[in-house]
Amino acid sequence: MRLLHSVSQLWLSGVILALLALPLALPLAAAPQRVISLAPHITELVYAVGAGEQLIAVSDYSDYPEAALGLPRVNSFAALNIEAILALKPDLVLAWRSGNPAQDLERLQQFGIQVAYSDPVMLDDIALELKQLGALLGHAQLGQQQAAAFQQRLTTLRKAYAHKPRPRVFYAMGVAPLTTVANSAWPAQLLRECASDNIFADAKGDYPQPLLEQLLVRQPTVIIQPQQAATAAFWQRYPNLPAVKNQAFVSLNADWVYRAGPRMLDAMQALCEGLEPYRGSVDNI
Amino acid sequence: MLKQLKPRQQALLWLLSGLLVLSLLFSLQIGSVAISWRELLLALTGQAVSEPLTQTIIWQIRLPRLLVAMLVGAGLAVAGAVLQNVSRNPLADPYLFGLMAGAGLGATIVSIVLPDQLISMALAAFLGALLAVLLVFIACMGNRLQKMEVTLLAGVAVSFMLSAISSFILYFAEPFAANRVIFWMMGSLSRTDWHSVALIAPAVMVLLVVALAVRRQLDALLLSDDSARSLGVNTQRLRLVLLLLTALVTACIVAQCGGIAFVGLMVPHMVRYFMGVTAVPLLLGSALFGAIFMMWVDNAARSLLAMQEIPLGVITSVLGSVFFLIILRRQLQQGG
């Protein structure tokens, strides 16, 4: 009888302990544990808020951090592999509103898959995304920390460069055909943040294809390129461009500058620092 | 109708029907998720499967998609066969009326210019395709569709005009949206569901039934317009009805699946080689062979690359363009 009593007491205290622990455990249990990321920048954000372990599949080109390379790929920019996504039984799919096809996402939702959206447009949105993703994936605290760190670094960079002399820059997204950036394209935002004047800031669209003549007339003093690859021969044809004459080239990591992840600030820092040598009165050289 | 066929033609049609059923079964098994034959048969017969997901994949993803593939292949092939016989031009093809360019323009406008979700891409593509047909018909009104060459040339001109407008819009578009429209124009069945089956099936059926109903007139038209008229065929009305009907079917198909070129050109020629030129064996053979062909093209599209799809139009165009050149070459040799 005594034994029974103590056993039941033990059991009761166990129940009470479990009940006490429940509020602590609940948010964790509710966070989705089988998550699919449909864009490279989302994959980077998910890892940044410490939820990489919850990812079960990713998009094409999700190559950072390295851990993502081992995950199955379920979509390209053109279409989602709905069958593969359903088979993986995700409890949350993270989609990119402007990058993933809307019809496919609608179809996923019809099959009862929960879809959450990411759609950063401006630099400050990235901090917001970190915070939201952290909360959504059960890592609210780390998400908030990462967001604050991002915002802090952004503010520091802005302060450091805002009032510097502004060089005239051409962003060579590609040379065949000649393609540049303007308006709300990510690199165009970085050009503004780093206090430089994009010679095609007045163009229409985010990725305009300017005329070569216009490039020659507008006389950029610095040329920025995502990679220093095979463009050298192209630029040597125009030795009278100030940027070519002075060999004023800045190269940027394309993965940093086109993905709205935390590494965007690495791109910003590299760009701002890369422009430093050319901020003086280059025209007089 | 079937009794008038030669035994060889009948045998071929039965063979094609058998192949169609076998292809359907095989294709149901192909996909990025492995499903065993046993599971497949259980799911198809509506019995309980150990994995409920299998039911969804078979019934909601693979089966509607394969049915659309069959309907698209059959529809385009029958449309091509009808157009080639009506015009006595071996190079006639349902897309030569500028339909694809029109559908492309519709898709471009709806996904880039108009606000989201105002009208669906399929409806816009359909309206665009109808616009192209309308322009071609207006351009050819004077010659009353007597000279098919004129109609085909008008189609080419309308194509260029409408795709120029699309290109201009795409030039200013946000790159992802532009890429998606371009990808859409290359053709894919990945967005098809039962809804698409319900939209395409009636159109294809009506075309096949009408074409079979006028089989005698179609055969008379093969001789020459004069001979057909002397046999009591109203050649102008027949041509107009069939042209409009094929345009409508093609517009339905393009609206759902984007551009799947050359099927309408290629399949009827292959069928003619085995079945002869008369309407009944040609139309039935084209429908069956087109359906089988399209199913296997789609199988290739969704299984050649792991986890990714190759646009259908790429595969059909590669096969079709080579075939087109061979026909041209042969015609030259016959003519010379």
Image (cartoon, coloured by chain):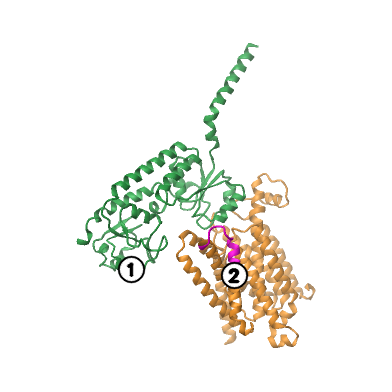
Disc on res. A214: 1
Query: Quarter-wise, where is residue B199 in the image?
Result: bottom right
Q: Residue furthest left?
A: A285
Where residue A219 appears, x then y in whole percent?
A: 28, 65
Name the residue at the right extreme.
B3
Residue B230 or residue B106, whichever sits in front: B106
The residue stretch that appears in magenta: B113-129
Q: Which residue is mark 2?
A: B129
Q: Please rate how many residues cluster around mark 1, counting C-alpha atoms within 10 Å: few if below 14, some from 14 to 19, many from 20.
A: few
Q: Quadrant of residue A180?
A: bottom left
Q: Residue A248 location in percent, x, y?
A: 26, 59
Q: CA distance from mark 1 to mark 2?
A: 38 Å
- Can you tell which mark lies on residue B179? none
For this rendering, which residue is in front, A54 or B292?
A54
Which kind of residue does numbered mark 2 sit on? Answer: Ala
Q: Position of residue B31 (x, y in %)?
A: 60, 54
Residue B98 falls in which quadrant of the image? bottom right
Query: Across the whole image, how many numbered discs are drawn on residues?
Result: 2
Q: What amino acid type is highlighted by mark number 1?
A: Gln
